[in-house]
Image (cartoon, rainbow, N blue to C red):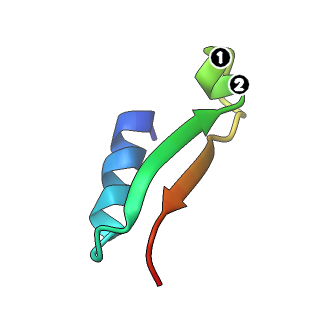
């Protein structure tokens, strides 16, 4: 799954609109990912 698709899916799950931003880090962010790489994300949200 590419980053754009994953981001859209995460935002679609955000029914309360609590996600403020998503940070991509690790090998994918550096452009050094391989077929075995995972996708490292930090999701910042605000709410209860």
Q: Residue at x 41, y 47 (%)?
A: 6
Instruction: Identify whether 48 is placed above or below 20.
Output: below
Residue lying furthest top in this view? 31
Distance CA(mark 1)–CA(mark 2): 5 Å
Assess whether mark 2 and mark 1 are in contact (beta carbons under 8 angstroms): yes
**Residue that badge 1 annotates:** 30
Q: Residue at x 68, y 41 (%)?
A: 38
- Secondary structure under tag 1 reads helix
Relative placement, left or right, of 14 versus 35 is left
Instruction: Identify whether 6 is placed above or below 35.
Output: below
Instruction: Identify whether 20 is placed above or below 4.
Output: below
- Secondary structure under tag 2 reads helix
Relative placement, left or right, of 45 versus 25 is left
Where residue 43 sits in the image (x, y, percent)?
Answer: 54, 55
Say if residue 34 shows up in the picture.
Answer: no
Q: Residue at x 48, y 63 (%)?
A: 45
Q: Residue at x 48, y 46 (%)?
A: 22
The front one of 19 and 30 is 19
Decide: few, some or many residues near mark 2? Use Cα within 10 Å; few <14, some 14-19, many ≥20.
some
Where residue 48 sits in the image (x, y, percent)?
Answer: 47, 85
The front one of 46 and 40 is 46
Decide: few, some or many residues near mark 1? Use Cα within 10 Å; few <14, some 14-19, many ≥20.
few
Where residue 4 sits in the image (x, y, percent)?
Answer: 35, 36
Where residue 46 sits in the image (x, y, percent)?
Answer: 45, 68
**Residue that badge 2 annotates:** 27
């Amino acid at each position: 799954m590419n980053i754009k698709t994953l981001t859209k899916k995460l935002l679609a799950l955000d029914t309360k609109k609590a996600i403020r931003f998503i940070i991509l880090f690790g090998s994918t962010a550096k452009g050094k990912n391989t077929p075995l790489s995972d996708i490292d994300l930090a999701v910042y949200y605000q709410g209860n």
